[in-house]
Image (spheres, coloured by chain):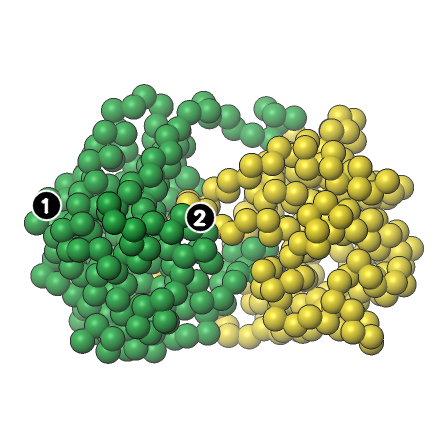
Chain colours: A green, B yellow
Amino acid sequence: LGPLLFESAPGVGRHEVIIECPEHLANPARLSDEQLRDVFLAYRDRLVALADEPGLRYAAVFKNVGAEAGASLGHCHSQIVATPIIPDNIQAELDGAKHHHDRHGRCIFCDIVASELADGARVVARSPGFVALVPAAARFAYELWVLPTHHASRYETLTPADAAELAGLMKRVVRALDAVLRDPAYNWFLHAAPLRSPDLPHYHWHFELMPRTSRPAGFEWGTGCFINAVPAETAAAELRAATM
Amino acid sequence: LGPLLFESAPGVGRHEVIIECPEHLANPARLSDEQLRDVFLAYRDRLVALADEPGLRYAAVFKNVGAEAGASLGHCHSQIVATPIIPDNIQAELDGAKHHHDRHGRCIFCDIVASELADGARVVARSPGFVALVPAAARFAYELWVLPTHHASRYETLTPADAAELAGLMKRVVRALDAVLRDPAYNWFLHAAPLRSPDLPHYHWHFELMPRTSRPAGFEWGTGCFINAVPAETAAAELRAATM
């Protein structure tokens, strides 16, 4: 049955937990600016280190906040799961971005950033080098993406100054989520180029934040389609107001 | 932005709720054999009826049991959401099955049924025409598939006798789930050929049952990979014992 159904990959990987503060804080919005900056730098440092491990192809970097979002620990932490495969969702995103670049000669995320900044209706907050927005076809109500405004495919190029700026913007964003949704459970997930990638003209690293305002049910699990009853513009307007 | 990012489909569809019993029962395991048979026949009748509606391409038939599985009503019910697209997950399954048939000249689900019945370790229960098994690479702990043992791509070919037999097997399965996992929340989802399909040599209708024993978190949502700590053989052995 094995060779008939499965393509095999070697059974290797890494699972790391990043403990984000010595004191017991459960809400990342309460981390200091320096602590959150160091979290973003730790992600970078671990991606660099994991690239040296033979057999690993991708490192999934993510955070679970709240039991409803799957967190089994209260204390602020992030996790890294490195795998010998490029996960399906990431490969599909890479393929889609490549397809757009082949057709239009541009990075689709750069196109989204430019279009959203020009339009403004789905922008939640920005800093000189980053923008937080509600994607036009968000799967989850109040879903947010945080992207560098300039093209960058490899998260490993993040500088300490970038990390400090990203931390400042991310704190505004999670505080807005806490205010609008009353301390929701959520996940964030880093979308970045695979380990040991060269600079990719078609890809653009970013974070996706997924608040858990409803539970995916049979329809979502069966079809892969998502029901989101909050228009992106409405969610963005509420979150934008809460960042001010 | 629209034409750049989205392929559009007409905004049409149907959402139907099948109320499965006049008395207030919340657990489908307590439906009578006749009631559950009629549920499976109602699915068939609605697929036949929806095929006549212009613009609809797929009808997702599913059941949510328990709040943790997304149910917002207690009273036993199923839902049908018909869409003008073939959902991604279904299309991927159709494509994968077609690929297997092109390479091997056989239906992959027929191959799975034959292989699993010969091996036995992942089989939970069977009847003359149906089998319930734990798939070898289950996403969810105690996930179950229920398939006809003979090839059938279109659920619309289900006869009243088939429906009665299916109901009997499904009741044994959900009672085993209730016994082993103590009345878990779960979804079931019908995987069937799209509306107005001819008989497909490569596809094979089946139900997938997904108990909610843990909450998918950042890793699952980000990667599309699933962590399942219960080996299929262990889950099948526990469920099999509970059906006896």
Q: Is residue A64 above or below residue B235?
A: below
Residue positioned 10% across, 44% down in the render: A159
Tell if the residue under mark 2 belongs to the same chain as the one under mark 1. Answer: yes
Q: Earlier in the sequence, mark 2 or mark 1?
A: 2
The numbered disc on residue A72 is 2
Q: Are marks 2 and 1 in contact (CB under 8 Å)?
A: no
What chain is tagged by disc 2? A
Instruction: Measure the alpha-carbon separation of dots 2 and 1.
Output: 30 Å
Q: Is residue A207 visible?
A: yes
Where in the figure is residue A168, as x and y percent of width and height? 15, 59
Tell me: A60 left or right of B133.
Answer: left
The residue mark sitting in front, 2 or 1, is 2
Local secondary structure at mark 1: helix
Local secondary structure at mark 2: loop
Tell me: A34 left or right of B241.
Answer: left
Q: Which residue is mark 1?
A: A160
Quadrant including the C terminus of chain A? bottom left
Q: Residues within 10 Å of mark 1 (few under 14, many from 20)?
A: few
The numbered disc on residue B165 is none
**Amino acid at pointer 2:** Ser
**Amino acid at pointer 1:** Pro
Tell me: A65 left or right of B44.
Answer: left
